[in-house]
Image (spheres, rainbow, N blue to C red):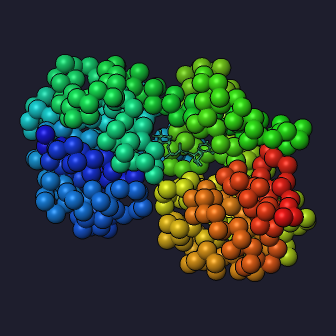
Amino acid sequence: MRVSVIGCGHLGAPHAAAMAELGHEVIGVELNPETCEILQSGRGAFYEKGLDDLLAKHVPTGRLRFTTDLAEAADFADLHFIAVGTPIRSDGHGYDTGQIIGAVRDLAPLLKRPATVVGKSTVTVGTVAHLQTILAEHAQGGVDLVWNPEFLREGHAIEDSLRPDRIVAGLTTSAAEKAVREVYAPILERGDAELIVTDPATAEVLKSAANAYLATKISYINAMAEICEITGADVATVAHGIGIDHRIGHAGMRPGIGYGGGCLPKDVAAFTHRVGELGATGASALLTAVEEINHSRLDAARALVEHAHGGPLGTATIAVLGASFKAGTSDVRSSPALRLAGLLQDAAARTVIHDPEAVPAARRLHPEYTYADTLGEALAGSDLVVLATEWPQYTKDPSLPVASAGLVRRPVLVDIRTAVDPAGWARAGWTVHQLGRSAHRPTTV
Ligand SMILES: NC(=O)c1ccc[n+]([C@@H]2O[C@H](COP(=O)([O-])OP(=O)(O)OC[C@H]3O[C@@H](n4cnc5c(N)ncnc54)[C@H](O)[C@@H]3O)[C@@H](O)[C@H]2O)c1
Ligand SMILES: O=c1ccn([C@@H]2O[C@H](COP(=O)(O)OP(=O)(O)O[C@H]3O[C@H](CO)[C@@H](O)[C@H](O)[C@H]3O)[C@@H](O)[C@H]2O)c(=O)[nH]1
């Protein structure tokens, strides 16, 4: 099929690359000329595992190309994916729908023959109906609208796009269903992804409900971490023990500083606002509590850093390991790691941030912070090491505890992601502090 992907950011660029890999002819439309030029050169504009490989494979053959010209895409493609941003409004009262309404309003008059518009962006209930009226008024030649929310995780965007758990299609016509079945045929033929054909409102709620549940699970285990701190219990053992019950499971149960990123914080905030508007008081109270617990984690993390230092931070030199909102991505949108680094930057004598991939993005957002090019440079002479993002370079390298103990002034580690094995670090002479767990002290061998 000839498809376009309108908006080539963290969702759209991997989606366009995956569509090319599935055998379609793809044109990506990206408003930002700099991003568009980078993509057209066969590279990603940010770090996402496997993205560069697919771009390098499909851009040179012409199967995948990028443009800033929407008219070119309207002329070329029969199916148009919409993957533009839906950021949270500055007052927090739902999404800023400017990008999505703008994209559909600009595309509609350019559609001169039958086409399918497939929305992938995350929206709240009622948005699809509004977009439908825009298309009905301005498009010619019979245009179907489908809502096809995306569930990919950053850091796994390519594999999640090529092998999704499910494909949700909110639609109203059989022509739209036929188009969805055709574009996803290579995935559906494998038989391992369920296609859920439903109405647009259900598709809208299903996506918001999925992210709200993921956020609730994270806030739940973080609330348990708070209880463990008070009682002296161990949250990692609690998470492991309850997760053995397959009705609960271990996934998404890592305690720590709470959820961040370009999706969960804004999607939960927008959903909370919308369900409040709709008068769903139970859902509103539940989601408000989820958000409150999440916000409280930053204070808990800062308090743990102060406790580990043994007092006010004014004299401390701190190494912060990690700036991205989670491992596997260079995305720093609503990054809890960077927020904590900011608090420490204000409070400590010196704070140095290291990240294997996210320093350029962090530096663009916060040029006033201090960054290190190498891990060794960040660690050198520090009184406290704060593990803020669970990159495997920090958590899985068995030589790091011993190697880094020789670089720091005091071997004190605050692991706000509950990501390291504290016993291994303690054996190398480190005192390890984790949220919801008793401190691990150095052991004599
Ligand atoms: N990031 C994820 O992992 C993810 C996963 C699932 C769903 N989503 C949803 O997908 C949507 C996009 O998220 P994102 O993280 O990719 O955002 P993003 O900001 O990284 O990307 C959006 C891109 O769209 C471009 N754009 C805006 N208007 C345009 C237009 N009219 N024409 C062409 N390009 C345009 C922007 O320049 C930007 O590059 C959001 O609704 C988000 O909630 C994101
Ligand atoms: O056990 C866990 C799991 C995650 N997190 C944090 O939660 C945030 C979100 O993580 P994750 O869900 O892996 O990241 P995203 O890439 O933002 O993906 C979420 O948001 C996307 C956008 O809607 C959805 O498509 C995905 O299904 C959904 O997982 C990050 O800050 C993580 O560090 C935890 O604290 N503990």
**x 87%, y 64%: residue:** 444
Picture quarter with the N terminus:
top left
Tell me where residue 130 appears, x and y as whole percent.
34, 30
Q: Is residue 399 visible?
A: yes
**x 13%, y 43%: residue:** 2
Picture quarter with the C terminus:
bottom right
Tell me where residue 87 appears, x and y as whole percent.
47, 47
Q: Is residue 323 visible?
A: no
Question: Vertical placement of 279 versus 318: above or below?
Answer: above
**x 20%, y 31%: residue:** 185
Occupied quadrant, residue 345: bottom right
Occupied quadrant, residue 274: top right
109 and 19: which is toward the camera: 19
**x 35%, y 48%: residue:** 158
Occupied quadrant, residue 93: top right
- Please state the quadrant of the image where ligand 2 appears: top right
Extreme residue in the front direction: 445
66 and 19: which is toward the camera: 19
Tell me where residue 324 appears, x and y as whole percent.
56, 59
With 420 as the anchor, is 230 left or right in this view?
Answer: right
